[in-house]
Image (cartoon, rainbow, N blue to C red):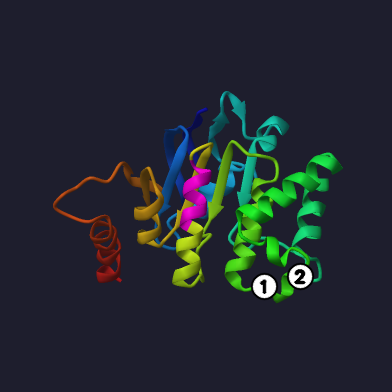
Amino acid sequence: MELVIDRLSKQYGAKIAVDRISVKLNKGVYGLLGANGAGKSTLMRMICGILKPTGGTVTFDGIDSDKEAFRAILGYLPQDFGYYPEFSAKDFLLYIAALKAIPKKEAKKRVAELLELVGLSDVATKKIKTFSGGMKQRLGIAQALLNRPKLLVLDEPTAGLDPKERVRFRNLLGSIGKDCIVILSTHIVSDVEHLSDEVMIMKDGSFIFQGKWNDSEMSLEDFYLSQFEEDEAHE
């Protein structure tokens, strides 16, 4: 199981949003940190095959990101995932399962498993419009897991969650990361510290750090803040 990002770039006119990024990822949780505008969402969308790169490639076990076989192994939770407020949690997941061509019998079983996994079994028949932000995010994770993905991409999944929900979310992702590649994009350093096997810090479209954080002289948060405080000082 290997995701290979090779010299991936995205340019809009004179602006370079992602600048020739290369990385190889195996099973585990990878935290992608960066301030707003660093290029995180652009990178994530190219990894998912939603956005066409200006240059470079993304492959999973040799399969290109623009192929149907790549989408079959992908689970994606965008920053604002679309849902139908009048649907119940159960009906929404069954609907998404149908869109993903999961057989009806298998879908019913999978939906029940996922509602249990994300802690929504007791509200399975309640309308999504009655859910809290944390409950909606957990539903978002469930829909991303319907097809048993080998690659799970999450864009700012803990934004707006209260501390209790954030801890619950971390525990959930930690267990998921044992069986697939999880890329978690965020600007919340504590989420990355608690969850990630490796850290990738993005600034101005490039990685300024990639790997395990084990600097005994500076915490990850202090390093991260120092990089972006410099930018604020020059504004």
Residue, far right = 104
Residue at the location (65% across, 35% down)? 73
From the image, which quarter does the C terminus lie in? Answer: bottom left
Contact between labelled residues 1 and 2, with CB atoms less than 8 Å apart: yes
In the displayed structure, would residue 228 be above or below residue 171? below
Could you tell me if residue 223 is visible in this image? Answer: yes
> Tag 1 or tag 2, which sits nearer the N-term?
2
Residue at the location (57% across, 44% down)? 152
Label 2 neighbour load within 10 Å: few <14, some 14-19, many 20+: some
Q: Is residue 171 magenta?
A: yes
Principal secondary structure, stretch drawn in magenta: helix
- Quadrant position of residue 72: top right
The numbered mark at residue 131 is 1
Residue 86, percent from left and from top: 81, 71
The numbered mark at residue 169 is none
Q: Type of residue at label 2? A: Lys
Residue 10, percent from left and from top: 52, 45
Q: CA distance from mark 2 to mark 1?
A: 8 Å
211 to the left or right of 113: left
| Residue interval drawn in magenta | 170-177
Residue, far bottom = 130
Under circle 1, the secondary element is loop
* Residue carrying label 2: 126
Residue 9, percent from left and from top: 49, 41
Under circle 2, the secondary element is loop
Along the viewing direction, whichever of 29 and 111 lies nearer the viewer: 111
In the displayed structure, would residue 179 be above or below residue 142? above
For discs 2 and 1, the disc positioned in front in the rendered view: 2
Q: Type of residue at label 1? A: Phe
138 to the left or right of 87: left
